[in-house]
Amino acid sequence: MNFLYPQFLFALSAIAIPIIVHLFNFRRFKTVYFSNTRFLRQVKIETQSKSQLRHLLVLLSRILAIVCLVLAFAQPYLKSKNHPLEAGEKAISVFVDNSFSMEARGGEGTLLDEAKKKAAEIALAYKPFDKFQLLTDDFEARHQRLVNKEEFNEMTDEIKISPSSRTLSAIYARQKDAVSSFSKGAKTLFIISDFQKTVSDVQDIKPDSSLNVYFIPLAAAQTANVYLDSCWFTTPVRQLNETQELLVRVRNTSKEPVENIPAKLTINGKQKALASINIEAGGTAEIKMSFTISEPGIHQAELSITDYPITYDDVFYFSFDVAPNIPVLCINGDKQSKSINAVFGKDSLFILTNNPESMLNYAAFANYRLIIFNELNNISSGLSQEIRRFVENGGGLLIIPSQHIDYGSYNELLSSFKAAAVAGFDSNATKVSQINFENELYRNVFGKISENIDLPVVSKHYNFVKNQQSNEEYLLRLSSGNSFLSKYAVGKGKLYVSAVPLSGNWSNFPRHAIFVPTLYNIAMFSKPPRKIVLHHR
């Protein structure tokens, strides 16, 4: 056994006081006169025996009281090999989780109320001269110092719910830094939280033998909750004065179904759509919210539902961009393409510009989202350099080869993109046999796919030799296994390469029904769309 304050053991010498009192009885006796002493001897013997026993018990009680009092001040303890106690001041760091999830109801109010109460109980277990650090998800600068117990309690009372959320490893590192400068006594860390799965990266915490770490979990009394899971548009591009459809997925974690949960969509501060949701117990539901945008630019949207008592996940904010049009530049070889003009020239969403290869303004490339090489026989080094910069900065490029290409200039450009090189052409008749329905170009083009779907017929086509470093993704594939239309991710942009010109003697692709959605979606996805950014209120 060890003692935290062994100097108090000297007080055991006080045991001598009751012993002295017992050995030297200073009481004064009175003389009592009896007329008859015949029975006095028997009474005296009995009284003296009882008195000695009583005095001995009183002595032992006094000695025991002094020993217990001295031991209480000396504070005995059993020494542990893993966590030895140290005398003197102690440094205690307490983290109180105040993220949105702590709004859930516990057994004694919200989880945040329970966490603050436990923090106060921890402080109560220590002495007034010990040092404390309070830490929350806000990581405030004023919480980076050690304070006394009174100031710690005042700061604990001021804790409020915050949108911030920190991982356990970040919390541990911040607490460790705060107590690292304290060298007088023991250092103890407390983490009070509901330990959400998304932040509980315990595996990233490196233990420190000089620290005592305690995790104090809190559990919500009610886990039932209805929350917004995700939302997405049914089309990749927002268009002016066109009906937009937003799909919203809502989840119900309770064991009972919910009915008539109201959902509201607000855009730029104006309500645009309302819906009512019914969800089975433990299930999900998807609703469609339609609206129209009449102004171009970036729009701020708010999607909300009404659910109680957990409300922090009932509001999502997101933004989206509405472009007035999509500019397309077609660089033509010998002549313009009637097929390309038919797709882009008559649709108000697109602004099509046709330029011969001999009259190009490279500085204007940045004004377009898609550039098409329409049957160029030769690609100059200047054009190759400028188009590579255009694609890497986020633009889209569609290469439609001519019937008589210069292999060297084509392969030089394709090599700079790490794309497959042109190896020659194959005059054997074949047809397109596979469509990559997983790609964004064709994902939502077909409603029901028939096993005997009619696909383009090919009379002859160019062959390509794959580059091992390329990230080629086939869009249309021939029966021979060769690619008919390929896609490459290049920097922030995209490259599309066709294996045939648009001439009718090579294939019926320009006249096929799949031609229009192919070019249409290439233009749509030629520039990376703005991501929907979702976050809780």
Image: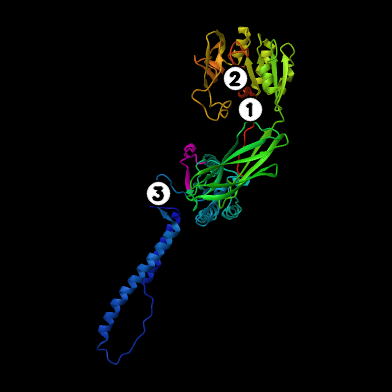
Which residue is disc 3 drawn over? 79
Q: In the visual, does 345 lie left or right of 2?
A: right
Q: Residues within 10 Å of mark 2 (few under 14, many from 20)?
A: few
Is residue 301 shown to the viewer in this render?
Answer: yes
Residue that extends furthest to the bottom in the rendered view of this protein: 35
Q: Amino acid at mark 1?
A: Pro
Whole-angstrom CA distance, mark 2 to mark 1, is 27 Å
- The answer to the question of whether label 2 and label 3 lie on touching residues, with beta carbons closer than 8 A, is no
Q: Amino acid at mark 3?
A: Lys
**Which type of secondary structure does the marked residue at label 3 adopt?**
loop
Image depth: mark 2 or mark 3 in front: 2
- Residue 137 position by quadrant: top right
Up the image or down, 20 lies above or below 330; here it is: below
**Which type of secondary structure does the marked residue at label 1 adopt?**
loop
The residue positioned 60% from the left and 34% from the top of the image is 234
Up the image or down, 527 lies above or below 12; here it is: above
Which residue is disc 2 drawn over? 512
Which residue is disc 1 drawn over? 528
